[in-house]
Image (spheres, grey):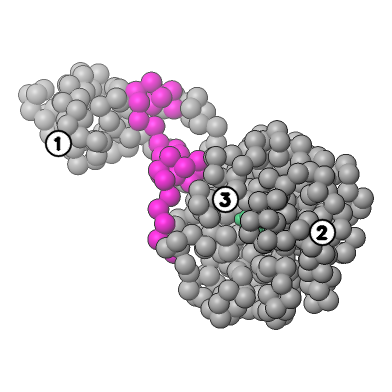
Protein backbone atom coordinates (compact mmCIF):
# COMPACT_ATOMS: atom_id res chain seq x y z
CA UNK A 1 0.00 0.00 0.00
CA UNK A 2 1.39 3.34 -1.06
CA UNK A 3 0.62 6.52 0.83
CA UNK A 4 -0.46 9.36 -1.42
CA UNK A 5 0.35 12.73 0.06
CA UNK A 6 -2.30 15.37 -0.20
CA UNK A 7 -0.86 18.81 -0.95
CA UNK A 8 -3.61 21.35 -0.37
CA UNK A 9 -3.34 24.59 -2.32
CA UNK A 10 -6.75 26.06 -1.43
CA UNK A 11 -5.00 28.97 0.29
CA UNK A 12 -2.73 29.68 -2.69
CA UNK A 13 -4.04 28.50 -6.09
CA UNK A 14 -7.62 28.50 -4.73
CA UNK A 15 -7.28 31.96 -3.29
CA UNK A 16 -6.06 33.33 -6.64
CA UNK A 17 -9.65 33.09 -7.92
CA UNK A 18 -11.20 36.54 -8.47
CA UNK A 19 -13.43 37.35 -5.50
CA UNK A 20 -12.01 34.57 -3.28
CA UNK A 21 -9.34 36.59 -1.53
CA UNK A 22 -9.03 35.77 2.16
CA UNK A 23 -7.75 37.98 4.93
CA UNK A 24 -5.12 36.77 7.38
CA UNK A 25 -7.59 35.54 10.00
CA UNK A 26 -9.64 33.64 7.43
CA UNK A 27 -6.48 31.97 6.13
CA UNK A 28 -5.48 31.00 9.66
CA UNK A 29 -8.90 29.54 10.42
CA UNK A 30 -8.87 27.48 7.24
CA UNK A 31 -5.26 26.37 7.69
CA UNK A 32 -6.05 24.85 11.07
CA UNK A 33 -9.11 23.11 9.63
CA UNK A 34 -7.01 21.72 6.76
CA UNK A 35 -4.58 20.36 9.29
CA UNK A 36 -7.48 18.70 11.15
CA UNK A 37 -8.62 17.27 7.83
CA UNK A 38 -5.26 15.49 7.64
CA UNK A 39 -3.62 17.01 4.59
CA UNK A 40 0.15 16.47 4.40
CA UNK A 41 1.11 19.85 2.95
CA UNK A 42 -0.57 23.24 3.19
CA UNK A 43 0.49 25.70 0.52
CA UNK A 44 -0.10 28.80 2.58
CA UNK A 45 0.50 31.48 -0.03
CA UNK A 46 2.91 33.37 -2.24
CA UNK A 47 4.86 35.48 0.29
CA UNK A 48 6.45 37.77 -2.30
CA UNK A 49 3.04 38.75 -3.72
CA UNK A 50 1.95 41.05 -0.87
CA UNK A 51 2.79 41.94 2.74
CA UNK A 52 -0.56 40.42 3.75
CA UNK A 53 0.30 37.10 2.17
CA UNK A 54 3.77 37.19 3.72
CA UNK A 55 2.22 37.68 7.18
CA UNK A 56 -0.37 34.95 6.56
CA UNK A 57 2.32 32.42 5.60
CA UNK A 58 4.34 33.42 8.67
CA UNK A 59 1.35 33.00 11.01
CA UNK A 60 0.27 29.73 9.42
CA UNK A 61 3.83 28.48 9.97
CA UNK A 62 3.42 29.30 13.66
CA UNK A 63 0.11 27.51 14.20
CA UNK A 64 0.45 24.40 12.03
CA UNK A 65 1.87 21.54 14.06
CA UNK A 66 2.31 18.51 11.83
CA UNK A 67 1.70 19.38 8.19
CA UNK A 68 4.43 20.80 6.00
CA UNK A 69 3.86 24.49 5.32
CA UNK A 70 4.79 25.55 1.83
CA UNK A 71 5.33 28.97 0.25
CA UNK A 72 5.36 29.64 -3.49
CA UNK A 73 8.04 31.56 -5.35
CA UNK A 74 9.16 32.13 -8.89
CA UNK A 75 12.68 31.08 -9.88
CA UNK A 76 13.84 34.49 -8.74
CA UNK A 77 16.26 34.95 -5.82
CA UNK A 78 14.27 37.76 -4.18
CA UNK A 79 11.07 35.65 -4.23
CA UNK A 80 12.89 32.66 -2.77
CA UNK A 81 14.53 34.72 -0.01
CA UNK A 82 11.19 36.27 0.97
CA UNK A 83 9.51 32.86 0.95
CA UNK A 84 12.28 31.53 3.21
CA UNK A 85 11.79 34.44 5.63
CA UNK A 86 8.03 33.91 5.76
CA UNK A 87 8.52 30.19 6.36
CA UNK A 88 11.09 30.65 9.13
CA UNK A 89 8.32 30.16 11.73
CA UNK A 90 7.29 26.76 10.34
CA UNK A 91 8.26 23.47 11.94
CA UNK A 92 8.32 21.75 8.53
CA UNK A 93 8.94 24.44 5.88
CA UNK A 94 8.98 23.84 2.14
CA UNK A 95 9.91 26.31 -0.59
CA UNK A 96 8.01 25.72 -3.82
CA UNK A 97 9.92 27.27 -6.67
CA UNK A 98 9.88 26.79 -10.42
CA UNK A 99 9.63 28.12 -13.92
CA UNK A 100 7.77 27.54 -17.21
CA UNK A 101 9.20 24.74 -19.33
CA UNK A 102 6.88 24.58 -22.36
CA UNK A 103 7.91 26.37 -25.55
CA UNK A 104 4.90 28.61 -25.16
CA UNK A 105 6.13 29.77 -21.73
CA UNK A 106 9.80 29.89 -22.72
CA UNK A 107 9.34 31.81 -25.96
CA UNK A 108 6.19 33.87 -25.49
CA UNK A 109 6.15 34.56 -21.76
CA UNK A 110 9.74 34.44 -20.61
CA UNK A 111 11.35 35.40 -23.96
CA UNK A 112 14.31 33.16 -23.33
CA UNK A 113 15.83 29.82 -24.38
CA UNK A 114 15.71 26.24 -23.12
CA UNK A 115 19.35 26.48 -21.99
CA UNK A 116 18.60 29.53 -19.84
CA UNK A 117 15.54 27.80 -18.34
CA UNK A 118 17.72 24.86 -17.30
CA UNK A 119 20.19 27.26 -15.66
CA UNK A 120 17.48 29.17 -13.83
CA UNK A 121 15.77 25.99 -12.63
CA UNK A 122 19.02 24.63 -11.16
CA UNK A 123 19.96 28.04 -9.71
CA UNK A 124 16.55 28.41 -8.04
CA UNK A 125 16.68 24.96 -6.44
CA UNK A 126 20.25 25.45 -5.19
CA UNK A 127 19.40 28.87 -3.77
CA UNK A 128 16.25 27.56 -2.07
CA UNK A 129 18.31 24.67 -0.62
CA UNK A 130 20.53 27.24 1.09
CA UNK A 131 17.49 28.09 3.28
CA UNK A 132 15.53 24.86 3.71
CA UNK A 133 16.08 21.15 3.15
CA UNK A 134 12.67 20.56 1.57
CA UNK A 135 12.53 22.17 -1.88
CA UNK A 136 9.76 21.47 -4.37
CA UNK A 137 10.38 22.36 -8.01
CA UNK A 138 7.49 23.03 -10.42
CA UNK A 139 7.91 22.80 -14.17
CA UNK A 140 5.09 25.16 -15.11
CA UNK A 141 3.05 23.98 -18.10
CA UNK A 142 4.72 20.55 -17.93
CA UNK A 143 1.52 19.25 -19.52
CA UNK A 144 2.49 20.94 -22.80
CA UNK A 145 6.25 20.44 -22.42
CA UNK A 146 7.80 17.76 -24.60
CA UNK A 147 8.84 14.82 -22.46
CA UNK A 148 12.49 14.82 -23.53
CA UNK A 149 13.10 18.43 -22.49
CA UNK A 150 10.96 17.99 -19.37
CA UNK A 151 13.08 14.95 -18.46
CA UNK A 152 16.25 17.07 -18.82
CA UNK A 153 14.89 19.80 -16.55
CA UNK A 154 13.71 17.31 -13.95
CA UNK A 155 17.05 15.45 -14.04
CA UNK A 156 18.87 18.74 -13.51
CA UNK A 157 16.77 19.75 -10.50
CA UNK A 158 17.03 16.27 -8.96
CA UNK A 159 20.82 16.60 -9.24
CA UNK A 160 20.55 20.07 -7.67
CA UNK A 161 18.79 18.62 -4.61
CA UNK A 162 15.04 19.08 -5.19
CA UNK A 163 13.09 16.82 -2.83
CA UNK A 164 9.72 17.13 -4.57
CA UNK A 165 9.09 17.31 -8.31
CA UNK A 166 5.88 19.00 -9.30
CA UNK A 167 4.60 18.18 -12.79
CA UNK A 168 1.73 20.61 -13.37
CA UNK A 169 -0.78 20.40 -16.16
CA UNK A 170 -1.08 24.16 -15.79
CA UNK A 171 -3.55 24.66 -18.63
CA UNK A 172 -5.58 21.49 -18.10
CA UNK A 173 -4.57 20.36 -21.58
CA UNK A 174 -3.59 16.70 -21.21
CA UNK A 175 -5.71 13.62 -21.67
CA UNK A 176 -5.38 11.09 -18.83
CA UNK A 177 -3.40 8.62 -20.98
CA UNK A 178 -0.98 11.31 -22.07
CA UNK A 179 -0.50 12.66 -18.59
CA UNK A 180 0.00 9.19 -17.13
CA UNK A 181 2.56 8.46 -19.87
CA UNK A 182 4.40 11.68 -18.99
CA UNK A 183 4.76 10.63 -15.35
CA UNK A 184 5.81 7.16 -16.44
CA UNK A 185 8.42 8.65 -18.80
CA UNK A 186 9.93 10.69 -15.97
CA UNK A 187 9.91 7.72 -13.59
CA UNK A 188 11.80 5.59 -16.11
CA UNK A 189 14.21 8.20 -17.50
CA UNK A 190 15.30 10.39 -14.58
CA UNK A 191 18.10 8.92 -12.46
CA UNK A 192 17.54 9.25 -8.73
CA UNK A 193 13.86 10.16 -9.11
CA UNK A 194 12.90 7.33 -6.76
CA UNK A 195 14.37 9.36 -3.87
CA UNK A 196 11.99 12.25 -4.60
CA UNK A 197 8.27 12.77 -4.17
CA UNK A 198 6.61 13.07 -7.57
CA UNK A 199 3.73 15.49 -7.47
CA UNK A 200 0.88 16.18 -9.88
CA UNK A 201 -0.86 19.55 -10.09
CA UNK A 202 -3.70 19.42 -12.60
CA UNK A 203 -6.04 22.19 -13.70
CA UNK A 204 -9.56 21.59 -14.89
CA UNK A 205 -9.91 23.47 -18.18
CA UNK A 206 -11.28 20.38 -19.93
CA UNK A 207 -12.84 18.88 -16.80
CA UNK A 208 -9.99 16.34 -16.55
CA UNK A 209 -8.10 17.53 -13.47
CA UNK A 210 -9.24 14.65 -11.29
CA UNK A 211 -8.83 12.00 -14.00
CA UNK A 212 -5.34 13.28 -14.80
CA UNK A 213 -4.29 13.30 -11.14
CA UNK A 214 -5.45 9.71 -10.78
CA UNK A 215 -3.59 8.78 -13.99
CA UNK A 216 -0.56 10.41 -12.35
CA UNK A 217 -0.62 8.22 -9.25
CA UNK A 218 -1.32 5.10 -11.31
CA UNK A 219 1.94 5.86 -13.11
CA UNK A 220 4.18 6.61 -10.14
CA UNK A 221 3.24 9.99 -8.64
CA UNK A 222 2.97 10.01 -4.84
CA UNK A 223 1.57 13.47 -4.16
CA UNK A 224 -1.56 15.16 -5.49
CA UNK A 225 -1.95 18.94 -5.41
CA UNK A 226 -5.57 19.91 -5.06
CA UNK A 227 -8.06 22.32 -3.51
CA UNK A 228 -11.28 22.04 -1.54
CA UNK A 229 -14.27 22.28 -3.87
CA UNK A 230 -11.84 22.26 -6.82
CA UNK A 231 -11.47 26.02 -6.74
CA UNK A 232 -8.51 27.57 -8.52
CA UNK A 233 -7.45 29.59 -11.53
CA UNK A 234 -10.00 29.59 -14.39
CA UNK A 235 -11.92 26.28 -14.30
CA UNK A 236 -10.14 25.34 -11.10
CA UNK A 237 -7.76 22.74 -9.76
CA UNK A 238 -8.17 19.06 -9.01
CA UNK A 239 -10.77 18.62 -6.23
CA UNK A 240 -9.37 17.33 -2.97
CA UNK A 241 -12.63 15.64 -1.99
CA UNK A 242 -12.81 13.79 -5.32
CA UNK A 243 -9.30 12.33 -5.30
CA UNK A 244 -9.54 11.37 -1.65
CA UNK A 245 -12.79 9.47 -2.20
CA UNK A 246 -11.60 7.87 -5.45
CA UNK A 247 -8.52 6.57 -3.63
CA UNK A 248 -10.64 5.36 -0.70
CA UNK A 249 -13.39 3.72 -2.73
CA UNK A 250 -11.77 2.52 -5.93
CA UNK A 251 -8.03 2.27 -5.32
CA UNK A 252 -7.98 1.30 -1.64
CA UNK A 253 -6.03 -1.88 -2.27
CA UNK A 254 -3.08 0.04 -3.65
CA UNK A 255 -3.16 3.51 -2.15
CA UNK A 256 -4.29 5.45 0.90
CA UNK A 257 -4.32 9.04 2.18
CA UNK A 258 -4.42 10.37 5.72
CA UNK A 259 -7.46 12.54 5.13
CA UNK A 260 -10.37 12.17 7.54
CA UNK A 261 -13.20 11.93 5.01
CA UNK A 262 -15.86 12.79 7.62
CA UNK A 263 -14.59 16.37 7.60
CA UNK A 264 -14.92 16.82 3.84
CA UNK A 265 -18.42 18.29 3.80
CA UNK A 266 -18.07 20.52 6.87
CA UNK A 267 -14.78 21.97 5.60
CA UNK A 268 -16.12 22.33 2.07
CA UNK A 269 -18.91 24.52 3.48
CA UNK A 270 -16.46 26.56 5.55
CA UNK A 271 -14.23 27.21 2.52
CA UNK A 272 -17.27 28.20 0.50
CA UNK A 273 -18.49 30.58 3.21
CA UNK A 274 -15.08 32.17 3.88
CA UNK A 275 -14.45 32.69 0.16
CA UNK A 276 -18.00 33.67 -0.74
CA UNK A 277 -17.87 31.08 -3.52
CA UNK A 278 -20.91 28.81 -3.84
CA UNK A 279 -20.35 25.11 -4.53
CA UNK A 280 -22.30 23.92 -7.58
CA UNK A 281 -25.24 21.78 -6.45
CA UNK A 282 -24.21 18.78 -8.56
CA UNK A 283 -20.56 18.84 -7.41
CA UNK A 284 -19.32 15.33 -6.58
CA UNK A 285 -19.03 14.56 -2.83
CA UNK A 286 -19.77 18.05 -1.51
CA UNK A 287 -22.55 19.46 -3.72
CA UNK A 288 -26.00 19.99 -2.22
CA UNK A 289 -27.40 17.31 -4.53
CA UNK A 290 -24.58 14.77 -4.13
CA UNK A 291 -26.82 12.63 -1.91
CA UNK A 292 -30.27 13.86 -3.02
CA UNK A 293 -32.71 11.73 -4.99
CA UNK A 294 -35.69 13.15 -6.77
CA UNK A 295 -37.00 10.76 -9.41
CA UNK A 296 -39.52 8.11 -8.38
CA UNK A 297 -37.45 5.20 -9.72
CA UNK A 298 -34.31 6.25 -7.86
CA UNK A 299 -36.18 7.11 -4.68
CA UNK A 300 -37.88 3.74 -4.61
CA UNK A 301 -34.48 2.04 -4.97
CA UNK A 302 -32.71 4.13 -2.32
CA UNK A 303 -35.55 3.70 0.19
CA UNK A 304 -35.30 -0.08 -0.26
CA UNK A 305 -31.49 -0.22 -0.21
CA UNK A 306 -29.31 2.89 -0.11
CA UNK A 307 -26.56 1.47 -2.32
CA UNK A 308 -28.86 0.94 -5.32
CA UNK A 309 -28.11 4.55 -6.25
CA UNK A 310 -25.37 5.64 -3.83
CA UNK A 311 -21.78 4.39 -3.96
CA UNK A 312 -20.75 6.36 -0.87
CA UNK A 313 -22.46 6.41 2.52
CA UNK A 314 -23.13 10.13 3.10
CA UNK A 315 -21.99 9.84 6.74
CA UNK A 316 -18.57 8.81 5.51
CA UNK A 317 -18.11 12.32 4.09
CA UNK A 318 -19.83 14.18 6.89
CA UNK A 319 -23.38 14.40 5.53
CA UNK A 320 -26.12 13.27 7.97
CA UNK A 321 -28.23 11.35 5.50
CA UNK A 322 -29.40 11.02 1.93
CA UNK A 323 -32.21 13.35 0.91
CA UNK A 324 -35.44 12.28 -0.67
CA UNK A 325 -36.58 15.41 -2.48
CA UNK A 326 -40.23 15.50 -3.48
CA UNK A 327 -40.82 16.73 -7.02
CA UNK A 328 -43.40 16.05 -9.72
CA UNK A 329 -41.17 13.11 -10.74
CA UNK A 330 -41.47 11.45 -7.29
CA UNK A 331 -43.59 8.41 -6.62
CA UNK A 332 -45.72 6.99 -3.82
CA UNK A 333 -42.76 5.36 -2.04
CA UNK A 334 -41.02 8.70 -1.60
CA UNK A 335 -44.20 10.42 -0.47
CA UNK A 336 -44.89 7.74 2.15
CA UNK A 337 -41.24 7.94 3.26
CA UNK A 338 -41.38 11.70 3.77
CA UNK A 339 -44.65 11.44 5.69
CA UNK A 340 -43.03 8.80 7.86
CA UNK A 341 -40.16 11.20 8.58
CA UNK A 342 -42.81 13.60 9.91
CA UNK A 343 -44.12 10.80 12.17
CA UNK A 344 -47.16 9.99 9.99
CA UNK A 345 -47.64 6.41 8.78
CA UNK A 346 -50.16 6.60 5.94
CA UNK A 347 -52.54 3.73 5.24
CA UNK A 348 -52.80 2.57 1.62
CA UNK A 349 -56.02 4.53 1.16
CA UNK A 350 -54.57 7.67 2.72
CA UNK A 351 -51.50 7.37 0.52
CA UNK A 352 -53.64 7.13 -2.62
CA UNK A 353 -55.49 10.30 -1.71
CA UNK A 354 -52.32 12.08 -0.59
CA UNK A 355 -50.60 11.19 -3.85
CA UNK A 356 -53.38 12.70 -5.97
CA UNK A 357 -53.18 15.99 -4.07
CA UNK A 358 -49.36 15.82 -4.09
CA UNK A 359 -48.98 15.58 -7.91
CA UNK A 360 -51.20 18.61 -8.38
CA UNK A 361 -49.11 20.67 -5.98
CA UNK A 362 -45.83 19.27 -7.35
CA UNK A 363 -46.65 20.26 -10.92
CA UNK A 364 -46.64 23.89 -9.84
CA UNK A 365 -43.57 23.88 -7.62
CA UNK A 366 -39.86 23.08 -7.92
CA UNK A 367 -40.11 20.86 -4.84
CA UNK A 368 -42.73 19.90 -2.26
CA UNK A 369 -41.70 20.78 1.29
CA UNK A 370 -42.81 19.75 4.79
CA UNK A 371 -45.31 22.65 4.98
CA UNK A 372 -46.97 21.34 1.80
CA UNK A 373 -47.12 17.87 3.34
CA UNK A 374 -48.96 19.30 6.34
CA UNK A 375 -51.51 20.88 3.98
CA UNK A 376 -51.87 17.53 2.19
CA UNK A 377 -52.34 15.76 5.53
CA UNK A 378 -55.15 18.16 6.51
CA UNK A 379 -56.83 17.60 3.14
CA UNK A 380 -56.63 13.82 3.46
CA UNK A 381 -58.63 14.09 6.66
CA UNK A 382 -61.30 16.05 4.81
CA UNK A 383 -61.31 13.60 1.87
CA UNK A 384 -61.54 10.54 4.14
CA UNK A 385 -64.35 12.12 6.17
O1 LIG B 1 -0.67 25.65 -12.31
C1 LIG B 1 0.54 25.78 -12.05
O2 LIG B 1 1.42 25.45 -12.84
C2 LIG B 1 0.89 26.36 -10.75
C3 LIG B 1 2.34 26.37 -10.39
C4 LIG B 1 2.72 27.69 -9.81
C5 LIG B 1 2.64 25.23 -9.49
O3 LIG B 1 0.02 26.73 -10.00
ZN1 LIG C 1 -1.93 25.88 -10.54
**Range shown magenta:** 274-302
Which quadrant of the frame does ligand 1 lie within? Answer: bottom right
Q: Of 159 and 376, which appears nearest the observer? A: 159
Residue 19 lies in the magenta-colored region: no
Residue 117 position, x and y percent, is 77, 61
What is the number of the mark on residue 318?
Answer: none
At 48% from the left and 69% from the top, the residue drawn is: 22
From the viewer's perspective, is residue 219 above or below residue 201?
A: above
> Gap between marks 1 and 2, in whole Å?
76 Å
> Gap between marks 3 and 1, in whole Å?
46 Å
Whether the residue carrying mark 2 lies under 8 Å from ligand 1 is answered with: no
Name the N-terminal-most of marks 3 and 2: 2
Q: Which quadrant, please, contains the N terminus?
A: top right
Q: On the picture, is 244 further left or further right than 122?
A: left
Mark 2 sits on what residue?
Answer: 115
Residue 353 position, x and y percent, is 17, 21
Mark 1 sits on what residue?
Answer: 375
Amino acid sequence: MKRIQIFDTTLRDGEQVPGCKLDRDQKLRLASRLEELGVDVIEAGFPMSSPGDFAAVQEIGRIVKNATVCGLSRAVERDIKIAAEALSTAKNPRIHTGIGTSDSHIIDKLCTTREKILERAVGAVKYAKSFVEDVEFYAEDAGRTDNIFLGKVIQAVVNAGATVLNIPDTTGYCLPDEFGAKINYLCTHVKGIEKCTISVHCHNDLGLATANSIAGILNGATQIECTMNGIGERAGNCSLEEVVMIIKHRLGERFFTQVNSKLLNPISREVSAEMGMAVQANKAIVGENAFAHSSGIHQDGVIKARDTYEIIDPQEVGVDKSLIVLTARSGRAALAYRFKELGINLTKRELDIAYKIFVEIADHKKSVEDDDLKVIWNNIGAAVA
